[in-house]
């Protein structure tokens, strides 16, 4: 069984919803299992609650040590000034031993994101995330233009050839649209197909 981990950080629930759509796409591929987990919150509970952070999320907390158990990892992070969140960066900064031992070499890696505005750093967040995956020797997979949802111009939508994305609005009230969720499902399925092919070698 090919295993795909969807590993995310979600402050207000947008990336959590996208992660579920990605898992749906992964599960469309026979013989591929989708597992959803999240990285630990680094904010103190009182501060997080005061900010309205969604503390209670059903996805369990991942450990660095389990990452080599998967054939592919799809990482999800909101953008922070055009880069990943501190929570995701903190988690990845603990993967040094995996890097030293080459434990993620050849694994499939992919990224999805969210931003408050239409041009709020979705592409730069994913592209800068790729440098970490490349240092680990991972095989990067994006969203090819056979995913026609990213070609739409009749509505505002996240997503790019680099990965699925959603736009939250400055107040965070906009939830992922049907089109954005469609791109996420496509990405999940695309990663699953490639991971299954890789694991069969």
Image (tube, helix red, strand yellow):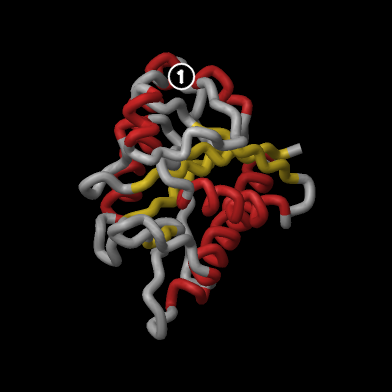
For the N terminus, which image quadrant? top right
Residue 127 in the image: above or below residue 119:
above
* Residue 2 image offset from top left, x and y in percent: 71, 39
Q: Secondary structure at mark 1?
A: helix
Which residue is at 34% across, 34% downward? 50
Q: Please, which residue is most extreme toward the left here?
A: 81
Residue 91 in the image: above or below residue 170:
above
Q: Is residue 57 visible?
A: yes
Which residue is at 47% across, 41% downward? 75
Residue 87 in the image: above or below residue 177:
above
Which residue is at 67% across, 37% downward? 3
Which residue is more in the foreground, 30 or 166? 166
Which residue is more in the foreground, 189 or 46? 46
- Mark 1 nearby-residue class (10 Å; few <14, some 14–19, many ≥20): some
Which residue is at 36% across, 47% downward? 78
Q: Quadrant of residue 65?
A: top right
Q: Please, which residue is most extreme toward the bottom here?
A: 154
Residue 29 in the image: above or below residue 139:
below
Q: Quadrant of residue 134?
A: top left
Q: Is 88 on the left or on the right of 34, as rendered?
A: left
For the C terminus, which image quadrant? top right
* Residue 74 image offset from top left, x and y in percent: 51, 43
What residue is disc 1 on?
98
Which residue is more in the foreground, 188 or 61? 61
* Residue 121 image offset from top left, x and y in percent: 26, 55
* Residue 36 image offset from top left, x and y in percent: 61, 38
Q: Is residue 140 visible?
A: no
> Looking at the image, how many numbered discs can be counted on the residues?
1
């Amino acid at each position: 069984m090919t295993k795909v981990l969807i590993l995310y950080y979600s402050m207000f629930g947008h990336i959590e919803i996208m992660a579920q759509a990605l898992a749906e796409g992964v599960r469309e591929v026979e013989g591929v299992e989708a597992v959803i987990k999240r990285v630990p919150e680094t904010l103190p509970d009182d501060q997080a609650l005061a900010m309205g952070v969604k503390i209670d999320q059903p996805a369990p907390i991942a450990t660095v040590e389990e990452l080599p158990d998967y054939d592919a990892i799809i990482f999800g992070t909101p953008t922070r000034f055009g880069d990943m969140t501190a929570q995701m960066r903190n988690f990845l900064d603990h993967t040094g031993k995996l890097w030293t031992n080459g434990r993620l070499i050849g694994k499939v890696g992919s990224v999805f994101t969210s931003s408050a505005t239409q041009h709020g750093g979705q592409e730069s967040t994913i592209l800068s995330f790729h440098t970490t995956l490349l240092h680990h020797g991972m095989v990067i997979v994006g969203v090819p233009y056979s995913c026609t949802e990213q070609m739409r111009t009749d509505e505002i939508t996240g997503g790019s050839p680099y990965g699925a994305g959603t736009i939250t609005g400055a107040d965070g009230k906009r939830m992922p649209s049907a089109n954005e969720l469609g791109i996420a499902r496509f990405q999940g399925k695309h990663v699953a197909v490639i991971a299954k092919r890789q694991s069969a070698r």
